[in-house]
Structure formats: structure tokens, C-alpha cells
Image (spheres, grey):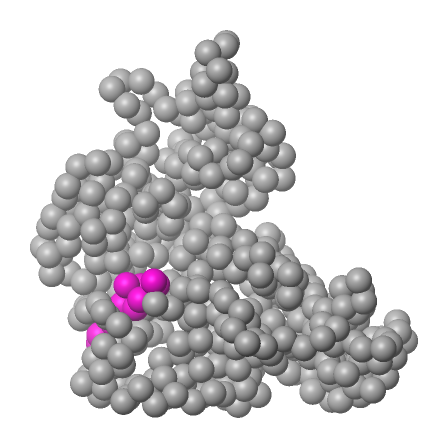
Amino acid sequence: MAMQTPAPVDYSRATSVDDAISQMESLGGQARFLAGGHSLIPMMKLRLANPGHLIDINPLEPELGYIRQEGGEIRIGAMTRHVHMLESELLGQHFPIFFEAEHVLADPVVRNRGTIGGSLCQADPAEDLSGVVTALKGQAVLRGPGGAERVVGMEEFHIGPYMTAVQPTELLVEVRFALKPGGGSAHEKVERRAGDFAIVAASAALWIENGVITDAGLACSAVGPTTMHISRAEEMMIGQSPSEDLFAEAGAIASQDCSPSADGRGPVDYKRHVAGVLSKRALSRAAASALR
Amino acid sequence: MQVSMSINGEPFSYDVEPRMLLVHYIREMAELHGTHWGCDTSNCGICVVLMDGVPIKSCTTLAAQAEGHEITTVEGLEKDGVLDPIQQGFHEMHALQCGFCTPGTMVTGRWLIDKHPDPTNMTDYEIREAISGGLCRCTGYVNIVKAIRWAAAYEAAAATGGN
């Protein structure tokens, strides 16, 4: 039988967040945390990932699976599965972009297992949720040995393809989003078939007060070595009135500032074009949801 | 490592390598060959089983991760020689040809009817989206959608005592 199976690996279960981190510490940071496993296990089968040891953090779902409002923030626990973000009324109310992105992320069976923490830490540049969190200016809470916590913005979180600021003995435990007045958001994606990785995706968030854009978030997926944060377009829009011309200009910046490579999903000029079109559409719908 | 779980209501426990995938545990250890093993890359949905009532891809789950959980495979659908309505629906509507994807599609259909608030009024879109994690190269899906709808209608009729 031509069976694809991971290489031999040791396995243990975490009983708490602190236990997970101390297990990792005692293994010298050489293990991998296993969340939903829907990226890690396929990579292990292909021998692209060869951890000697897996620390299964699925038993931490009761501790790390939540979506709640706390003070002026929405907080999502790292073990929250895609299906729960898709179905969350709280997220739908404040950040409709989550519903839109989750709806086109993989398929319902995969969404039953995959987690926000796994998606962010996998840091696949074509993945939808990293763009969403970047556009919403989410903050990643990383816990390390001794309970030490640090909070990292997405601009520092993505440091390269499949590479994040999470250190070997750290665990992403939570993602936080500030609630600010006048917010709206939207996600646009073009894919080859339902549930596939994007050819290009654009995630947009706008905060609009008294007819003026007070803050803006724009990120594109699958058009660069990491999730592309289109900060030049964000800065250009702040202080302006929302308009189709403004969003077209922001889209043009996204086309210029992304960095796609040619592959089976299309040539560079096509992907730049699509990044511009989707950015404009996403911004336009984000503005409509902010003003509703 | 010792890995124990319930499959279709029966307890199973085997000493397996931690790297063993759930699909191989079900097929090779528990010797339940109804669950098929397809693409091995989480794309085709042939290996789908229910874990605590929720469909998952058993080729992308370690057996160790199912420790202590309730697994339902296609063999668990039929009760005392009576086909589950989802199975009967596949029969009535000719929702399979080669049958390779059928075990995964049937348990996914079962889950959809169980979780849907109003199964007799499911839209085609809802059904198609629910089964979008599975690939069928024979049917074109039309008869699969009809079969799931047939099962939902049959259960509603049975529940009200009508026919």
C-alpha cells in the first residue's frame, strides 16, 4: 500500500496552557503544538514538517475555545474552531468579515477542526484568516515559560513565509480586537474552486465617524511571501471621506504594493489586477457596513 | 501507546504508534472497512467519520486525538438490520455509482439533517455546501442532494406518523 503517513513521532497531551508550555520547555522547544492539525498533519505526511514530538493542545479547547467581549475588546481563544467563528453572533455583529472569510475558508468538515491559532501560526501567505486579523488590527497574545505574556500586532507577527514571531517555547493563546465606533468590514476572495486557497483575497476594515475615515485596515492574501499588509493605502485613506474614487485609489496601491509570483493560479500582472479589484470591492462593502 | 475509543457504540483499544491516522485505526485495527481512504490530503472527504456527532476527515486526524471520543462510521448508521433513512435515501434516489465516496457522504448527510433546524426545508445550497468537503466523480451530486432531501422528508413523515 502506498500509504502516506507521518514519520515516527512522540505524542503527549497538554492538560493546561501552563502544562503545554512547560512540556515544550522540557523538550527544548523542539516539539510542535498540535491544534486542529489540518495543516500540520498533511505537512508531516509530506515530510515538510518533521517534529520529533507533538504536544496535543486539543484538550485545552475548554480553556482556549471562546469568543467573548471583555471591556472594549473582542477576544478569541486560540483553540476556537472555524465553525464557531462562522456561527458566532457576537463576531457577526461587530466584524462581519469573519463570517465572510470563514464561509469561503476550506470546507465545512475542515472548519469543524481547524482553529484560529493554527491558522495564524501556520502563517500560510495564501490563508484567509491572517488577512482578516491583519485588516482588523488584531493583537496576538503569546504566552511563554513562567506565564510571561506579550502582545504582538500583526505587523510584527508575520516575519516570513510560514514564519511568525511566536518563539519555540511560546504558545499563541488569544487574539484581541479593539472595538471602535463606526466599524465595518468585508472579505473578498477569488479561488479556482469552492474551498480552495485563494488566487487572491482582500480583507478590509474601515472605521467611519461623522463621514470621515478615522482608521483603516487592508490586507491581501496569496500575493506575496507573507500576508500583505497594505499600510500605504491605509494611511492614504485616514482622514478622507469614503468614496468609490478613494477606494479605487487604495486598490491601485494594493496592486502596486503586493508582491505576487506567477504559478498555476495565474501570472503576476493578473494577480496584481485582481488584488486591486478585490481591495476596492472589499473597502466599498466595508464602508457600507460601517455606515449601515 | 494505548489508544481507546468508542466506534459505533462499541469500545476498542489497541496499542498503536502515535503517528497512526484515525482512518487506519478504523480500517486496520478495528477492521471496519466501510470507511474508505482516499486522497490522504483532506481534499476528497471520502474518509469522513463523525466524532461526537461532528464530521471530521479521519485521514487528517491522529488516532490518538480520538482517544475517549465517540466515533460513528457508515457501519454505525444501520440499526438492527434497518437502514438509516440516509442510506435508504441513497438507495431510492440512486445517489451512488461506484460507491467509493458514499461512506463519507452518507455520514455528512446524516450530520446535516441532525443539525439543521428545519430539515424538510433545506435549500439546495445548504445541502451542497454541507457536502462540499467531499468529492464524487460519478453522480454529479444531483442525486446525492435528492437522497439527503428524501431522508429528511422520510424522517419528518415518520415523526408525524404520516406517510
Residue A5 point in image, percent of width and height: 27, 60
Q: Residue at x 33, y 53 (%)?
A: B59
Residue B49 point in image, percent of width and height: 34, 43
Residue A4 point in image, percent of width and height: 29, 58
Q: Which quarter of the image is occupied by the C terminus of chain A? A: bottom right
The image quadrant of residue A20 is bottom left
Is A145 placed left or right of A142 in the picture? Answer: left
Q: Is residue B75 visible?
A: yes
The image quadrant of residue A210 is bottom right
Up the image or down, A221 lies above or below B129; here it is: below
Q: Extreme front residue here?
A: A71
Q: Residue at x 32, y 50 (%)?
A: B58
Q: Residue at x 51, y 37 (%)?
A: B116
Q: Is residue A124 visible?
A: no
Is A288 placed left or right of A194 in the picture? Answer: right
Q: Residue at x 28, y 63 (%)?
A: A59
Asked whether B112 falls inside the magenta stretch, the response is no
Q: How many marks?
A: 0
Q: Toward the viewer: B19 or A171?
A: A171
Q: Extreme top residue here?
A: B163
Residue B156 point in image, percent of width and height: 50, 21
The magenta segment is A50-62
Q: Toward the viewer: A159 or B11?
A: B11
Q: Toward the viewer: A91 or A282?
A: A91
Is A201 placed left or right of A28 in the picture? Answer: right
